[in-house]
Image (spheres, rainbow, N blue to C red):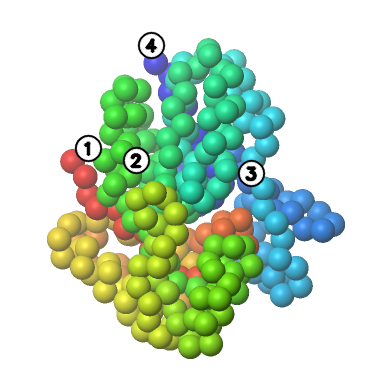
Amino acid sequence: MEKIALISDSTCDLNKETINTYDIKILNLKIIYKDREYIDRVDITPQQVYDNLKIEVPHTSLPSLEDMHNLFYKLEDEGYTHAIVIPIGSGLSGTYNTLRLAASEHSNLNITVFDSKSLTLGCGALVKDCGEMIKNGKSYEEIVSALPLLRDNISVYYIVDTLEYLIKGGRIGKVSGMFGQLLDIKPIISINSDGVYYTYAKVRGKKQAKNKLMEIIQNTLNTSKSKIWVMHGGAYEEGKKFYEDLKNNPNITHIGFGDISPVAGVHTGPGLLGVVIEKESLV
C-alpha cells in the first residue's frame, strides 16, 4: 500500500493550518547576516528582514543537503513508500536541482521532485492541491500526472515600491532598473513558462500599478472562476485594502491573504503587493 509524503520548502508561504492539515514536510531556507544565520520563518519574520534592510542586505541559502537527506531517511523510517517534492522553481533557486541530487541517493523511496516554476503561494497553491489529492486517496501516479496541468493554471504577478533590491540581487538589469526608478516606472513582474521572472507590463506610479494588477485579476475572473491569494511584503495595509476590494467577487471560489517569506523579501524589499491566481481545474 502506498504511503505518500508531501514536501515543500519554506518559500511556499503556506500557513501553519494548511501545513498541518496536509502534513506537509517543510525544508527551510536560510537568511545569512554577517554575524548570524537565521532559519526562514522559524527564528526570523518577514518584517524583521524589511526593518533591517537599510542596515544590511543579507544573503540567502538553500536547505542543506544534510537536511534533505535527513528528511528522506526519516520518511523511510516512518514507512513512507513515495514522496512528492514541490519546491520553489528551478529558475529562481538552486533548491530544485539540489533536491533532485539528494533524491537520487534514496532508492527505498519513489520520489518525484516536481518543478513548480513559481514561488511563494504560486508554489504553495500547487502543494495544497497535491495535499488535497493525497487526502482524497489518489494514487501516486495519478497525482504526478495531474501536476503539470495544475501548474499551468497558476500565475503570479507582483509590484514593488523600489527596484533597488531586485537590482542588487541580479534579478533585474542595473541600467534598465535605474532608468525605471528615475521615471517612477512600476513593472508588473510575473513568471514565464520557463519559470523565470519577466516584465508583464510597465506603468508609471504605484497607484496605476495597483489598478493594472486589479485589471489582470478581473480579466481572468471574466473567463474562469479562480482561487486568489493576495500577498504583501512589508505592505500590510495596502495588501489588506486590495484583499477587501476583491473578496466579494462571485467568481472567486477561495481568497487568501498573507505575507511572503523573509527569503523572498530580501530580494524584493519592502512595499511588495502581489497576487496568485489559480484557475479552477477539472482535475
Marks 3/4 in contact by CB < 8 Å: the verdict is no
Q: Secondary structure at mark 2?
A: helix
Disc assigned to residue 62: 3
Q: Earlier in the sequence, mark 2 or mark 3?
A: 3
Q: Residue furthest bottom?
A: 183
Q: Secondary structure at mark 4?
A: loop
Instruction: Give the residue at mark 2.
Output: 129
Distance from the alpha carbon under mark 4 to that under mark 2: 22 Å
Distance from the alpha carbon under mark 4 to that under mark 1: 23 Å
Q: Earlier in the sequence, mark 4 or mark 1?
A: 4
Residue at 72% in and 69% down: 52
Q: Earlier in the sequence, mark 1 or mark 3?
A: 3
Amino acid type, residue under disc 3 in the picture: Leu
Amino acid type, residue under disc 2 in the picture: Asp
Q: Is 241 on the left-hand or right-hand side of 214?
A: right
Marks 4/2 in contact by CB < 8 Å: the verdict is no
Instruction: Give the residue at mark 1.
Output: 283
* Image: 67 above or below 19: above
Residue at 59% in and 27% down: 102
* Image: 245 above or below 253: below
Q: Quadrant of residue 58?
A: bottom right
Camera-side residue: 250 or 233? 233
**Residue 148 point in image, percent of width and height:** 31, 38
**Residue 231 point in image, percent of width and height:** 45, 64
Q: Residue furthest right?
A: 35
